[in-house]
Each structure stands twice: as structure tokens, then as C-alpha cells.
Image: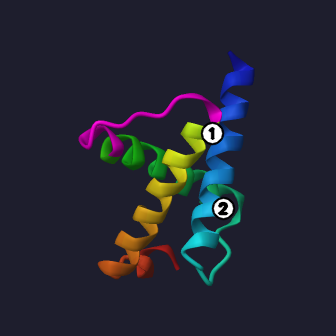
Amino acid sequence: MLWQWIIKIALWTLAGYLGSRIMKDGKPNGWLGNVILGLVGGLIGSFAFGLIGLGARGIVGDILVSVVGSCLVIWLVRKFNLGRWFD
């Protein structure tokens, strides 16, 4: 049970990091920022993929969905100028 959470946190961190690299986010988010980006990205990615009838299977699928979701979160933050809240 504990190992599953450790693996999930590691995946969220990786997904948040990859999302910030893909979107070329100028500011380093730090470990906690990447976890939050990956977590929110995973939730939003799962919701968005579910709307179009796709799902993720396994670790690679979870990372892919979380990265796409974190890119979407970064885009939304930039689009609606919400970055000022995170400074």
C-alpha cells in the first residue's frame, strides 16, 4: 500500500516535470510544484481522455495522461493569467 503511493508520487513528479519541460515553463517549479502539476494534470488528463472515450493502462499510460493533463493545466494558467497567484 505504501509502495503504491510512493510510486504514484514519483509518477506525478515525473509527469509534472515533463509537462513543464514540454511547455517550456521558464520558472522551475520545484519538487512540490511538479507533484501538484502532475496530480492536477493526471486528474484533468483522465477527465479529458474519458470525455473522448480513451483510458490509460499501466505506468506508461498514467504518465502519458498526466503529462498531457499537466500541459493543459500550464496552458490554462497562462491563458487566464493565473500565474500571478503562484509567484
Could you tell me which secondary element the residue under label 2 belongs to?
A: helix
For residue 9, the mark is: none
From the viewer's side, name the closer residue of 15 and 39.
Answer: 15
What's the CA distance linking mark 2 and mark 1?
Answer: 15 Å
Q: Quadrant of residue 61?
A: top right
Task: Residue lying at the far left in this picture: please name it.
Answer: 51
Q: Which residue is mark 2?
A: 17
From the viewer's perspective, tell me whether residue 79 is left or right of residue 30: left
Residue type indicated by callout 1: Val
* Bounds of the magenta segment: 49-59
Position of residue 57 measured from the top left corner of the image (x, y, whole percent): 53, 29
Q: Which residue is mark 1?
A: 60
Position of residue 79 measured from the top left corner of the image (x, y, whole percent): 32, 79
**On screen, residue 24 above or below 32:** below
How many neighbours does mark 2 have within 10 angstroms: few (below 14), some (14-19), or many (20 or more)?
many
Q: How is the image coloured?
A: rainbow
Position of residue 30 measured from the top left corner of the image (x, y, whole percent): 70, 65
Q: Residue at x 63, y 80 (%)?
A: 27
Q: Residue at x 49, y 58 (%)?
A: 70
From the viewer's perspective, tell me whether residue 1 is left or right of residue 39: right
Residue type indicated by callout 2: Tyr
Q: Is residue 52 magenta?
A: yes
Mark 2 or 1, closer to the camera:
1
